[in-house]
Amino acid sequence: MVPFPVGFRETLALHVRQRQQQGGSYLFESSWKRRYSDQGIRRMLERYTALAGMERTISPYKLRHFLLTWLKKQGIDDALIQPYSGHASRKSLEVYSRLALGEAQQEYERVIPRFPV
């Protein structure tokens, strides 16, 4: 399952219709009308992270990880995050809670000196 904003639904539907009219078989495919391989997607991410001037490359796994951590930090319940995570149980989502708490501690350390005591 891939999450996307509701407003993106119309854009995606237009893309699907266009792909069908062009005889495409896949939602996203190469110029040779073949599906992208995992390695091909990784190469694209490497190329675009370099073009964006990012120091570290991003993998599909990292993108999913960033999204799930962000959702957790927004206060979204684990039951709602789980379908997007690929994890079989909610217990597996604890890693995102720990990351969110770790960032909370860093933010606390950053602002606590300004606390008016």
Image (cartoon, helix red, strand yellow):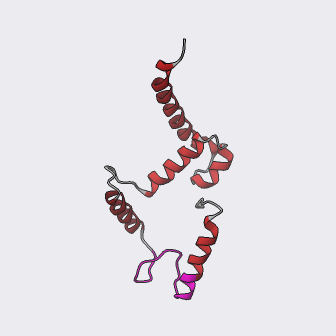
In this view, the residue in front, 89 or 112, is 112
Quarter of the image for the N terminus: give it: bottom right
Residue 102 pos. (x, y %): 49, 32
The residue at 44%/83% (across/down) is: 33
Residue 75 pos. (x, y %): 64, 40
Residue 6: quarter of image: bottom right
The residue at 43%/72% (across/down) is: 36
| Vertical order, 81 against 104 (above or below) | below
Tell me: 1 left or right of 36: right
Residue 34 pos. (x, y %): 44, 80
| Vertical order, 69 against 111 (above or below) | below
- Over which residues does the magenta segment extend? 18-35
Q: Is residue 60 magenta?
A: no
Tell me: 81 left or right of 113: right
Residue 20 pos. (x, y %): 57, 84
In this view, the residue in front, 93 or 4, is 4
* Count of numbered tags: 0
Direction top: furthest residue: 117
Quarter of the image for the C terminus: give it: top right
Tell me: 57 left or right of 108: left
Secondary structure that dominates the magenta span: loop
In this view, the residue in front, 1 or 117, is 117
